[in-house]
Amino acid sequence: MPNSKRKSLEDLVKMTEKVRIQFGGPDWSPEVRTLDLMEEVGELCNAILVQEGHKHKKRARAELADSLCDVLYNILLLSSLYKINLEQEYQQMLERLIERIKNKEFHDD
């Protein structure tokens, strides 16, 4: 990436959309984009198995990073497709989670 300035999540969504357009071809439907995301999650799972020593493969760390980025790519495109501000929604979700933790919703006591 030529510009190393730190980007917001919304900036990354816009950049990802530009890259998708550069691929050319037809736009993928939400269903196809989700299926591609699931494929990438499967590859991420495999990369984690390699990283944790359950499978053996060269370039384990690089493949783990690539797989995480592939998953993020599809998530960013889905957020753009559905016009969801991930930066705002994620922050709100974390705040709700913190509140639930404070309320001990995840404890069995």
Image: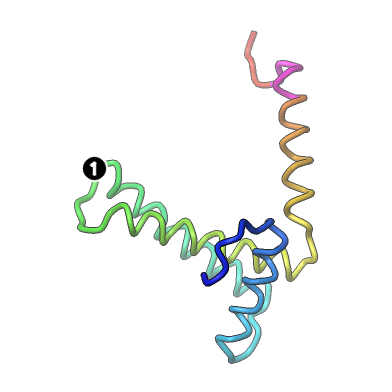
Residue at 57% from the left image edge and 68% from the top image edge: 3
Q: Where residue 94 sits in the image (x, y, percent)?
A: 72, 36
Locate residue 47 relative to residue 102 in the image: left or right.
left
- Disc 1, SS: loop
Left or right: 28 in relation to 98: left
- Total numbered labels: 1
Q: Amino acid at mark 1?
A: Gly
Residue drawn at x 65%, y 84% is 27
Residue 74: image location, x then y, percent = 58, 66
- In the picture, the quarter occupied by the C terminus is top right
* Span highlighted in magenta in the image: 100-105
The residue depicted at 72 percent of the width and 27 percent of the height is 98
Residue that numbered label 1 is attached to? 53
Residue at image position (33%, 58%) is 62
Q: Is residue 55 left or right of residue 67?
A: left
- Does 79 sit above or below residue 53? below
Q: Is residue 101 magenta?
A: yes
Task: Tell me the colour scheme of the image.
Answer: rainbow
Residue 82 placement: quadrant? bottom right
